[in-house]
Image: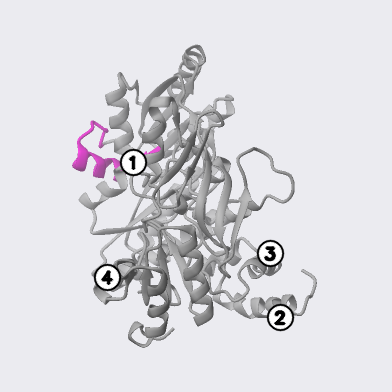
Amino acid sequence: MSKPSDNSQLIRNFSEILGSEQILTDPADRIVYECDGLVLNKRMPDVVVLPTTTEEVSEIVKICNRHEVPFLARGAGTGLSGGAVAYDGGVILQLSRMNQILEIDYDDKIAVVQPGVINIQLSDLTTEAGYHFAPDPSSQKACTIGGNVAENAGGPHTLKYGVTTDHILGLTMVMPDGSVETFGGRCEDIPGYDLVGLMVGSEGTLGIVTEISARLTMNPKTVQTFLAVYDSIEAASRAITQIIAAGIIPAALELIDSLVIEAVEKHMKLGFPTDAEAVLLIEIDGAPQQLADEAEQIEKICQESGVRKFRQARDEQERQDLWRGRKESVGALGKITQAFYTNDGVVPRSKLPEIVRRDIEIGKKYGLRVAHLCHAGDGNIHPIILYNPDEEQEVKAALAVSEEILKTCVELGGSLTGEHGIGTEKRETFGLMFSDDDQEQMMRIRTIFNPDELLNPGKIFPIGARCGEAKINKTINRGGWL
């Protein structure tokens, strides 16, 4: 795409459906959108538009198609894989003004929201009625539900309650040609292909979500939260495995290592033991009698696995403090490092001690420290690589460390991503998990919905896969079999 100053006709077309305050072309405005949470991957869009309705999104997309200009949707920009970055330039549809909660139906336990609604706002609005929106990424005070849908976001409580796809019933979407389609609805188990499941987690490459029908979850009757302090990662990991093996499914089961503990204490002073190698944050919820039995079993397992200290949050304030230490811990790392880079590899739970040790060894090989915040119950490790952004060699080292960690996760039977997505960050390692045939089948699906690849190009698939995609496109255009 040419520079904004050469795109007067494109801007005029946008102006016909949007006010001037909804179109950003000045570089000082556009630079805000040059990256998402993955700050190592910066590309400035040529134009940013701020629609407020499905109809406006549809018209914007049709204009982009007429001008053959690439485009993509963006929410709060908290993503960590480059998915909301204009890799090929073009137009960003910034959806933050589409932030209305359109309907709350407690009888059917459904909320209908626009994509720009902040995750935690839905729970805040419904909590007095006894409900919440279960997916709870650590960025839930900032991230949008539309972004959660795009990346199939998780969070600490997904061990028991599932990730975003488990809580989405229906979607209204503007397709890559500008048409508007509805997938799913307001009820469970709609027959036919699971197109809602296909769209959730497709990283904004199949369509732009403009309305979401989300399931509301009842608040638990009772919640108990525990902090278990360990002198070794291995001992903490044994407890994790044994808790799950005992048939207990905690609402959350998080592992925090010594580097993160150090940062949390410097920032918040919550009483986390700075001489521990790891702590577990364990939460259970449900009926009081059930929790009494589970709490007894969990404490016994922790004692048998070598816990140094085991305590239950005495009241709601202490419980909130413990969770604040977990949810704000990434920000707290600013107390011990100039910058950090995190990925979201996954391993089987039994491999947690091995992957943490190997992560640290990989970091040392490149002269960097690696911290860990793990959704330990489901093996999502979140290694955090500490580096100096002013040192080019350290930037390169951080990228190399992340790539080696992801390769190790796959070697151990895990995955490249648990919730951040592939985006551009993991694009060139996609082949570690998926064969050429696997990738071709996925590209066939994308080509059906997004044949010209104007919507969010350059994401998910390795650059070399584009040749195969061109062949797929030709086959589809002449009516060939998929």
Number of marks in picture: 4
Cα separation, mark 2 vs mark 1, equals 47 Å
State the image coordinates of residue 175 (x, y, percent, origin top left). Answer: 57, 64
Residue designated by label 4: 29
Residue 327 got which mark? 1
Measure how far apart labels 4 and 3 are at the Cα level.
Answer: 40 Å
Q: Is residue 2 left or right of residue 454?
A: left
Callout 4 touching callout 3 (CB < 8 Å): no
Residue in the picture at 45% in, 26% down: 219
Say which residue label 2 marks.
474
Cα distance in 3D space between marks 3 and 2: 19 Å
Q: Nearer the viewer, mark 3 or mark 2?
A: 2
Mark 2 / mark 1, whichever is N-terminal: 1
Q: Which residues are magenta?
A: 255-274
Depth check, front residue: 255 or 355? 255
Q: What element does badge 3 sit on?
A: helix
User: What's the residue type where badge 4 is placed?
Assistant: Asp
The CA span between labels 4 and 2 is 39 Å
Quadrant (top left/top right/bottom left/bottom right) for the N terminus: bottom left
SS for dot 2: helix
Of tags 4 and 3, the one toward the viewer is 4
Task: Indicate which label's residue lies in the foreground, 4 or 1.
Answer: 4
To which residue does mark 3 refer?
Answer: 438
Front tag of 4 and 2: 4
